[in-house]
Image (cartoon, rainbow, N blue to C red):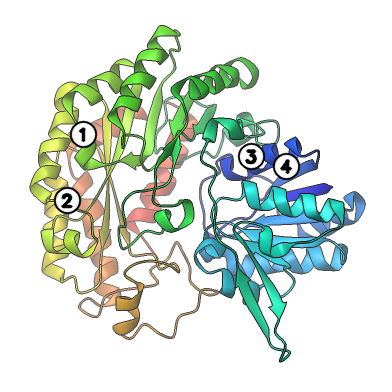
Amino acid sequence: MKILLISTTIPGGEQAVPDLGLGHIATHLRKGGHTVFLKDFSVERRDLDAFERYLKDEKFDVVGLKMFSGGLADGRKVTDRIKRALPAAKIIIGGPHPSCAPEHTLEYFADADYACYGEGELCLRALADQLQAGKLDLPAIPSLAFRETEPDGKTTVRINHAVQPEDLDELGWPAWDLIPPKRYASRQTINILPKEEVIAPIIASRGCAYACTFCTGHTITGKGVRFRSPDSLLDEIEMLIRDHGIQEFQIMDDNFTFKKSFVFDFCEKMKKRGIKIPWSCPYGIRVMSVTPEMIKAMWDAGCYYVALGIESGSDRILDKMNKKLRSGVVSERVQIIKDHSGMNVMGFFIIGYPTETVEEVEHTIEFAANLPLDFASFTTLRLTPGMGILDEVKAEGWTDFSWETIDTFKLSYHPTTISREKLNELRKKAYRRFYASPRRIMNILKSATSRRNLTVLAHLSWRRLFPS
C-alpha cells in the first residue's frame, strides 16, 4: 500500500528534530512491502493548499498522523484536507495524545478511521497488511482503537490490548532517508548549545519503570524498560557518520542510565571502535542513577552535556510528584558530575505544582541557583491527558479546560495557592536569579560558538524572561 506518515507541529514549538518514532514505523512498514512517504511540518512550509494538491497527486491509500495534545485544533485542519483530497483513504491518528486518550481522539477527529496508542510499529503494520489483503479483523490488531456499532445502534470506541515490541534490535533502524539529519541542522535546539551543526537523535531504550505524576511516558511506552544492544546503537551511529555526515548525536531516552551495565558497555565499545564525536543526554538522566564511575565512563567516551529531572527543591512537592527523590541527594549527585567530568549540566524544574505555595517556589528558585548547574529550565505544569496528577487538578476546580484549546507553550494551569500573574512573575524571577551568575554567563558565552547558537540563545532568553 502507498502510505503517508505526517509529523504534525505544536503551535509555538521552537525545535525541529528527526521523528524517530515515524522513522521506525516506516522501516517496519517497508519490511511488509509497503511504500512509505513522510512529511514533517516542523521543517516544511505548512501550506495547506499545496498539501491538498500533493495528496491528490500522490493518491495515498493510508495516511497516519502523529498528534500531540497541544496541537489538536491544528491537526484537525490537516485531517480535513486529507478527507477532502482523498475521501477513500484510511486515516489513523497516533502519538502521545491518542496513546493517553484514544476515545477522545476518535471523538474529536471525526474524519479519522482509527487511533493507535502506545508504540505504533506492530499496530500500523498489521492494519496495513489487512487493508492490503482486503480482509479486516480489527479486534486482532494490537494497540488499535476503532469505532464499532452496538446492536442498539449506538457507536462506541473499542480499544484493543496494547503490545510493545520486545526485541528493539529486530525492529531495525529508523528510515533515515526519510528524516535526514542535515535537513534539521538549522533548527535542532533540544540541546540548548550543541557543539556541532549536524546532529542525530538516537534512542537506546523504550519504556519507563517510574510513574511521576506529571508525566505520561510510562503510559505511552510501557512500564518495563527495554534496551537495544550497544552494538546495534554503535553500528547505527557509524552509519550516520558515514552516510549522513553527522558530527554529534543526542541520546533521547528518559532512562539511558537505568541499567548501568549497559552504559559501561556502550561507552567502552564506543572507545574501542574509535568513534570520536561529541554526544549528550538532553532529555535527562535519572538523578539517583548518578555514580562517579558511570559519569567518568560517559565523559571519557565523549559525553559533554547531561540534563537532570530535578523538578523541585521541596521534598513535599517531590513526594507529590512521586519522584522518589530527596533534595539533599540532588546536591550530592550534581556535585559528583562536576567532580568527575567537565560536563555541562542542565536542571529541569517545574514550579506551580498543585498545592504548592509561593514560599515553596521561592525555595526551589534559591535551591536551583545554589546548585553547581550550568543551565536550568523552569516550566509550569503542562496539562495532558493521562497524567497522574490530573484528578487533583480537576478537584481544584479546573474542569472547564478542553484538550483542543490547551496551549503547551503558555501557562494553562496555576494552583489555587498561586495566581496566574504571580506564577508568571516567579518564573521570570527564577531565570533572572539563576543566570545572575558571572560563571554561568561566561560559560554560556564560551559555548555559543556559532551563529545558530547565538540565535537560539537570544530566542530562548526572550521566551524565558518574558513568558506568556
Task: Locate residue 86, reporting x and y percent.
Answer: 87, 62
The amino acid beneath tag 3 is: Gly
Task: Locate residue 58, reporting x and y percent.
Answer: 89, 49
Q: Can residue 342 be seen in this view?
A: no
Using the image, tell me which numbered label, if any, was put on residue 29.
4
The amino acid beneath tag 4 is: Leu
Can you identify the residue that label 1 sits on?
A: 290
Mark sitting earlier along the chain (2/3): 3
Using the image, tell me which numbered label, if any, was put on residue 325.
2
Secondary structure of residue under mark 1:
loop
Secondary structure of residue under mark 2:
loop
Of circles 3 and 4, the one toward us is 4
**Could you give the CA–CA distance between mark 2 and mark 4, rounded to whole angstroms?**
41 Å
Q: Which of 367 and 109 is in front in this view?
A: 109
Horizontal side of 179 relative to 233 (left or right) equals right
Task: Locate residue 22, reporting x and y percent.
Answer: 63, 45
